[in-house]
């Protein structure tokens, strides 16, 4: 089940945006919008307006304003930092890393910038740099609860669960009202088999902040693992309402609805997910698989085609395409896709799946009164160019060579 790939527990990394002024959010919005309109070449105005948009969670507009601030003032450390935070929430993690690194180089004495940079490196899988910058932040300001939270996430990512829990308890000592630390503790408790503590940790996080989407999501994961799909749906629906732009939650909901036999609801969630991320091959595949099971074969084929378009090495999608075309008695397309499936699995050394595909394929040669030699000019994806099931090179040509 492809949707199960979303069935994960997420650590909560915290980035600390520059704090708001004493004025109201709307008041500052009006003030700085007017300032930018009257003086479009003032970097301070664009910076302050960008901060307002970060607080409004309009991260794209925030990024646009902050980019203008850094264009007008190239050594604007605070603007680069705030831009990095906007990029983080836009899920442009590598760009966020570059912006925060620029900010740190301009103002390397600031522990909060070092903390944010360490968090970004952790998100991007650079453990060494993450540890380096988080330790800098800890050394320069040992009272930062955010640093301890993210050091905990770093420890957990490297398998040091006990150390991670200690860091999160330190974070809570600094700030007892930090729901993110409870969420992260719940992740580790679940990982080490202490599900009751995990549930309690998520519930504590929700006591502190009942609008925390990740707490609802992770609580739903535990219910789903216990096969209580109704409760999982309840938590994930709440999470989705709180964070309407998270395709992970939507895919989890689709998976759970399918488990409950509610295919129409599952399809609706997958459609929403694809609108958010139209290039995700596995979501297209899941959509196609459900449509196929509902006897909507033509639409299923369209979805499977999109899946292999975005991932040319997606063996299961080719396999399902072969089955779908066979259901329509389209012999050439059925056999072609199963032949490609063979190559994908053989190249990936997935021999059990290769044998399964071959067992499905051989009867089709008889059914359609054809043979392998009839497919010697088969067009295969560029990634499979020159691959031979038996020897080193073969004569199968790619579409670009036709």
Image (spheres, grey):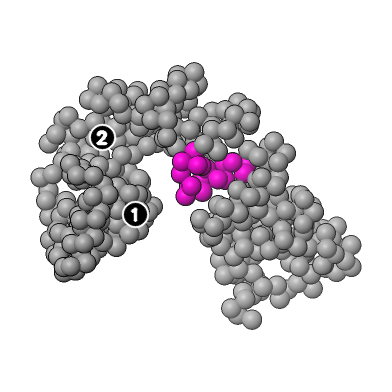
- Where residue 96 appears, x then y in whole percent? 30, 54
What is the CA distance from the residue labelled 1 to the residue labelled 2? 21 Å
Q: Residue at x 55, y 45 (%)?
A: 250
Secondary structure of the residue carrying numbered label 2: helix
The number of callouts visible is 2
Can residue 115 be seen here? The reply is yes
- Residue 332 or 348: which is nearer the viewer? 332
Secondary structure of the residue carrying numbered label 1: helix
Q: Residue at x 25, y 34 (%)?
A: 146
Q: Residue at x 59, y 65 (%)?
A: 309
Q: On the rendered image, what quadrant is the C terminus found in? A: bottom right
Q: Residues within 10 Å of mark 2 (few under 14, many from 20)?
A: many
- Where residue 130 appears, x then y in whole percent? 27, 43
Can residue 155 be seen here? The reply is no
Residue 167, picture quadrant:
top left
- Residue 49 or 267: which is nearer the viewer? 49
Residue 151, picture quadrant:
top left
Q: Tell me if residue 35 comes above or below residue 28 in the rendering.
A: below
Mark whose residue sits in front, 1 or 2: 1
Q: Tell me if residue 136 comes above or below residue 334 in the rendering.
A: above
Residue beneath label 1, please? 59
Give the left or right position of residue 164, taking residue 316 as reference. left
Give the left or right position of residue 164, taking residue 327 as reference. left
Give the left or right position of residue 398, taking residue 296 as reference. left
Residue beneath label 2, please? 146
- Residue 216 or 106: which is nearer the viewer? 216
């Amino acid at each position: 089940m492809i949707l199960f790939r979303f069935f994960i527990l997420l650590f909560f990394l915290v980035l600390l945006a520059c704090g708001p002024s004493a004025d109201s959010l709307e008041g500052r919005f009006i003030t700085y919008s007017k300032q930018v309109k009257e003086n479009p070449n003032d970097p301070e105005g664009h910076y302050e307006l960008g901060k307002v948009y970060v607080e409004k969670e309009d991260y794209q507009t925030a990024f646009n304003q902050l980019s203008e601030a850094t264009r007008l003032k190239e050594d604007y450390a605070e603007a680069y930092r705030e831009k990095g935070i906007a990029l983080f929430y836009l899920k442009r993690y590598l760009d966020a890393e570059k912006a925060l690194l620029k900010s740190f180089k301009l103002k390397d004495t600031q522990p909060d910038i070092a903390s944010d940079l360490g968090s970004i490196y952790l998100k991007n899988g650079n453990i060494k740099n993450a540890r380096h910058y988080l330790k800098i932040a800890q050394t320069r300001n040992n009272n930062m609860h955010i640093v301890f939270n993210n050091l905990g996430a770093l420890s957990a990512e490297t398998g040091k669960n006990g150390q991670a829990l200690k860091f999160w308890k330190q974070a809570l000592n600094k700030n007892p009202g930090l729901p993110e630390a409870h969420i992260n503790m719940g992740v580790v408790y679940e990982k080490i088999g202490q599900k009751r503590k995990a549930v309690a940790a998520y519930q504590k996080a929700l006591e502190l902040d009942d609008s925390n989407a990740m707490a609802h999501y992770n609580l739903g994961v535990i219910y789903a693992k216990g096969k209580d799909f109704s409760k999982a749906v309840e938590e994930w629906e709440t999470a989705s309402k709180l964070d309407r732009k998270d395709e992970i939650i939507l895919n989890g909901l689709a998976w759970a609805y399918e488990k409950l036999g509610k295919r129409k609801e599952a399809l609706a969630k997958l459609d929403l997910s694809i609108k958010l991320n139209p290039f995700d091959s596995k979501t297209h595949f899941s959509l196609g698989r459900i449509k196929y099971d509902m006897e909507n074969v033509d639409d299923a084929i369209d979805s499977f085609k999109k899946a292999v378009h975005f991932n040319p090495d997606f063996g299961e999608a080719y396999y399902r395409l072969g089955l779908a075309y066979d259901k329509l008695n389209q012999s050439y397309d059925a056999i072609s896709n199963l032949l490609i499936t063979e190559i994908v699995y053989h190249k990936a050394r997935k021999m059990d799946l290769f044998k399964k595909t071959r067992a499905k394929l051989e009867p089709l040669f008889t059914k359609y009164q054809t043979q392998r030699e009839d497919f010697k000019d088969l067009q295969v994806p560029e990634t499979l160019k020159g691959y031979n099931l038996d020897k080193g090179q073969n004569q199968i040509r790619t579409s670009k060579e036709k």
